[in-house]
Image: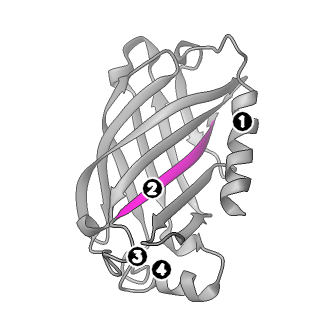
Amino acid sequence: MRIQYFAASLLVAAAVLPANAETLDVAPGRYAIDSSSQIHFSVGQIGGGGIEGTFQRFHGVFDLHPKDIGKSTVDFVLNPGSVTAGTPVIENFLKSGVVFDVADYPDITFRSTRVTQTGDTTAKIEGTLTAKGHTYPQTFDATLVSAKGSTLAFHVVGQIRRGYYDMEIGAPIYSTVVDLDMVMNGRRQ
């Protein structure tokens, strides 16, 4: 159900961008990540199923410099205590010390170190992700799905290895990789 809702939201966002889509050049500026953004995650399980959910609280900014995309930056903070996963049992497990440890680590942060344009509406975002006191390089792929007035929306995907962040409980039954699928809405500041 969650995946269907998320996929439908992404299709609606993509439909906003005209067939002759604008490029990243139309949207220079500093944008605050809006609370209407959607962050979906999934962890596969042997035999099918797995764990999936969303995060409800986060904030951040991105500075977009289309004339010199390498000067663009992304700073993002996620509150793992805002996880929703369908049942209180799973949510409490995810918040516990064996996964997110929200009591000791209330934030997961991402800070870009490099942004590279890969197409007219696409970019690769490299940076560092910090969770549970561990910091490792991380890469995300972003696609502009709408640009209207002072707002932008990007579809962002990436994969995170749980073991890097001391969250590998349940392996090998559960995948060691978390798939992230996000719609990031930005509002020009």
Could you say which is closer to the camera, residue 151 or residue 3? Answer: 3
- Which portion, as a residue range, is magenta? 177-186
Question: Marks 4 and 2: in contact by CB < 8 Å?
Answer: no
Give the residue displayed 37% in from the left and 67% down from the top.
175
Which marked residue is nearer to the observer: mark 2 or mark 4? 2
Queried whether the magenta region covers residue 157, the answer comes back as no
User: What amino acid is at disc 3?
Assistant: Phe
Disc 2 from disc 3: Cα separation: 16 Å
- The disc label shown at residue 179, or none: 2
Q: Quadrant of the N terminus?
A: bottom right
Q: Secondary structure at mark 2?
A: strand
**Could you tell me if residue 16 is visible in this image?**
yes
Gap between marks 2 and 4 measured at Cα: 15 Å
The secondary structure making up most of the magenta span is strand
Camera-nearest label, 2 or 3: 2
Q: Which residue is disc 1 drawn over?
A: 13
Dot 1 or dot 3: first in sequence order is 1
Name the kind of residue labelled 4 in the image. Answer: Leu
The amino acid at mark 2 is: Asp
Three-letter code for the amino acid on which mark 1 is drawn: Ala
Q: Is residue 189 visible?
A: no
How many residues crowd around disc 3 within 10 Å: few (fewer than 14), some, or many (20 or more)? many
In space, the residues marked 1 and 4 are separated at their CA atoms by 29 Å
Disc 4 + disc 3, Cβ < 8 Å = yes
Mark 3 — residue? 100
